Image (cartoon, grey):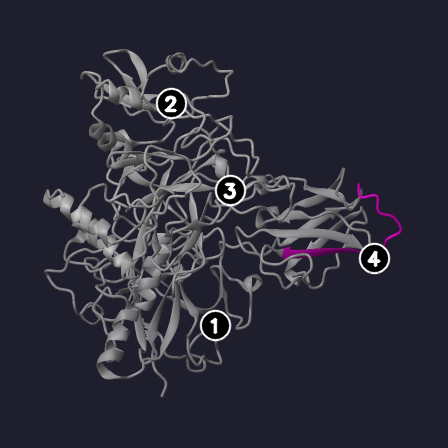
Amino acid sequence: MKKMLAVVLTLAMLFSVASASAVVANADTRQISVIQAITNYEHNTGEKVETNRYFFLMPNGKNGFKSTDGSNNYEAGDYVSSWYNDYANKPCIAWQNSGIADTEYPGYTMLNGDGGDVYYADVPTVVSEIVINNGVNYSSDENMQLYARKTVNICSEYYDANESEEYPEGLDGFDNMIYVIDPDKIVWSEDATSCVGLESGEWYYYYGNGCYGTKKDGNEHDCLRDDHDHENLYINFDTSNTGWTDYEKVYCAIYGEDRGPYYQPYTTPALMTDYDNDGVYTYDLNKSEINLKEYARYCIYFYNDKNQYTADLTMQTTNLKDTAYATDELNYLKRPFLRWTNEKELVLKPLQPLKDALEQYEEETGKDVATYRYYFLMPNGESGKKGDENTDFNYPFYNTYAENWYNKYTDTAGVYFWEGEDFLSSNYPGYSMEKGDADGIFYADVPCGVEMMFFNNCITQGLNYYDDIYHLARQSLNVPTRTDSSYYNGFPEGVENFDNLIYVLNPSKNDSLESPEPVEYGGEWHYYYGNGCYGDVKDGDISDCIRDDHTHGRRYKHLDEFLDYANLTQEDSYWYTGPLYYYYEDGKTEPEWFIARGNSGFSEYKYIYGVFDDYYINEYAVYSPSAFSWCIYIFDEQKFYSLEDAWDKGFVDKDAAFTQYFLKNDIAQLIGDADYDNELSVMDATAIQRHLAGIKKLYDSLYSDNFCYGEVLKYRSDFDRDGERTVLDATAIQKKLAGITD
């Protein structure tokens, strides 16, 4: 039976749910997504719901069809008025009387598609009519009616023959088609107080990338959008400076970023035409099978029937109608480099924010994705951590900051990963991160299932080496989201995840490549304190910040004072590599002492440890002016002392030094502190017992070939100092806590 498309319905039918209590809402008025509603229906009834996917082009005042006859209050050449406003940023879709997942007006939010203002929704196939709107529910408030936009009731079932001018033979359905409003088909309501108008249009086959038309198997070249350019899809090539000889035909080959020169080019045919016999050949892309996309990069090269070739050249849609020419430079294959006559900078597609991708995934699937938040400091050449001497990679970053990741193409950090259970990353470089609470700080909420990721600067290298963007892409090395005890020194027991921690590049850990390509950047995880501050103290604050370009109230003692104390000069092999600063609040008395470190950074270096009562220090240099290489500056004395001297002379309380500095900064540990919480408790005795029972593994062995100052300790948990880790250590800890002495 032929159905009739209702062009104008009564207000009661269109807005049966509206009432005097109706309120204005934006496009997020729905409580659950369409997918969730259908899932709930299937769960409650046991029935499988089949759906059709309907696309919609939301008017922004500059897209779609222009008015051709100036009817319905639109001048000829005008686009449909924008549906976006302060109360609307996405379209909604509603239907009734389907029996499945019905919804009240304004309905369910449609999801972002692949073409900017293109949105879609998966609707039950039993639905015969839909209404699309901008999510603003009208009321009796005349001012708010100005913000509401909606379509007529749209047929979503099928067209009979001659029911539509565009499809005289009819259509079986509209699955995967797009509805586009036509300004010449707007239906204006006679009741000006009720709504602005009922906007009408037509269904079209959707080709992707915002393109549509009436050809079922068409492509972008068949697109009917008035704001798309399809008449000037050609490029030219000037052969005058190539040095080519004795040729008759010229060809063009094009391949995209996802292909390479070893694959069949995307062009059919590839023959070019010299229309004016002036040596300038034209390639008509309308005749090819390639669908050029905005932002995408393509590699082109030219060759002739005598097997003479040019070098590669990067092309985007911004280069259409331009002419490529050969320069005087040759590549390593002795082929001429190419340039465009009208040089245009590459235009990169903005990455989708990860938070938006997760939100869309959850709406589409009805699944909630658990996440961890990871921070990243994007270096600007003057921020973060300075490089230490690193002979492993032999890269010239000693005492310098990481290179600047900002450039004319980017001011944002990105994250890429390839794991995450059902939710997977998009193509590299992945997703953009959110700006944090300080310059250069970015964060992303990454699915918990991700175990490895990259940080980058949101751009990829170019197709051609001579493109400047080729040398401006930056990315980190593999960044783990968890660690065992062997990976990071700062996490001796390992951590299940680095949730709410920050990854900071360390120039000394860059992976140097043999080629002149950009390096991959290594770094370290740190605890994040906010405002761009980070450190290695778990519950630290701004005073624990180890960021080299931050001061945060630090006061410095001059390096010469330390060198004088140690009887050194800057030419000696002993050299200072640790911090000579201390903290105190402005206006308050300086502290009684602070701790500094002197290492033999340019002489033989060996990790050793020292045992002092209930503590041990776990790294200091063999050749240093102090047995520990750690020194204490005493303000009353205005001079440096070794730790041994400071303690022997009574300037510093040993427990205070360990508690306030060494334990806090993970330089020393309590002997017997098996759970690494810097306190001796019954939990440490339990941890030792669990280890002996095979339930929990302790990673606290001390290497026997290391030099020891004081007692020799084989295990950190060897509390009774008998050289073994036994149940007696747990017992000794319990006695100590109970105040029992033998």
In this picture, is 617 found above or below 47? above
Give the extent of the magenta segment: 241-255
Q: What whole-number distance in Å separates the C-alpha atoms at marks 4 and 3?
A: 40 Å
Q: Quadrant of the C terminus?
A: top left
Q: Marks 1 and 2: CB-CB under 8 Å? A: no
**Residue situated furthest front in the rendering:** 742
Q: Nearer the viewer, mark 3 or mark 1?
A: 3
> Any mark on residue 474, and which?
3
> Any mark on residue 305, and which?
4
Is 391 in front, or is 2?
391
Q: Nearer the viewer, mark 2 or mark 4?
A: 2
Is 498 in front, or is 358?
498
Between discs 1 and 2, the one toward the N terminus:
1
Q: Which residue is mark 1?
A: 166
Q: What whole-number distance in Å separates the C-alpha atoms at marks 2 and 4?
A: 78 Å
Q: What whole-number distance in Å separates the C-alpha atoms at marks 2 and 3?
A: 42 Å
Q: What whole-number distance in Å separates the C-alpha atoms at marks 3 and 1?
A: 50 Å
Q: Which residue is mark 2?
A: 626
Q: Amino acid at mark 2?
A: Ser
**Residue drawn 51% across the image and 15% down it:** 571
In this picture, is 434 found above or below 249? above
Between discs 2 and 4, the one toward the N terminus:
4
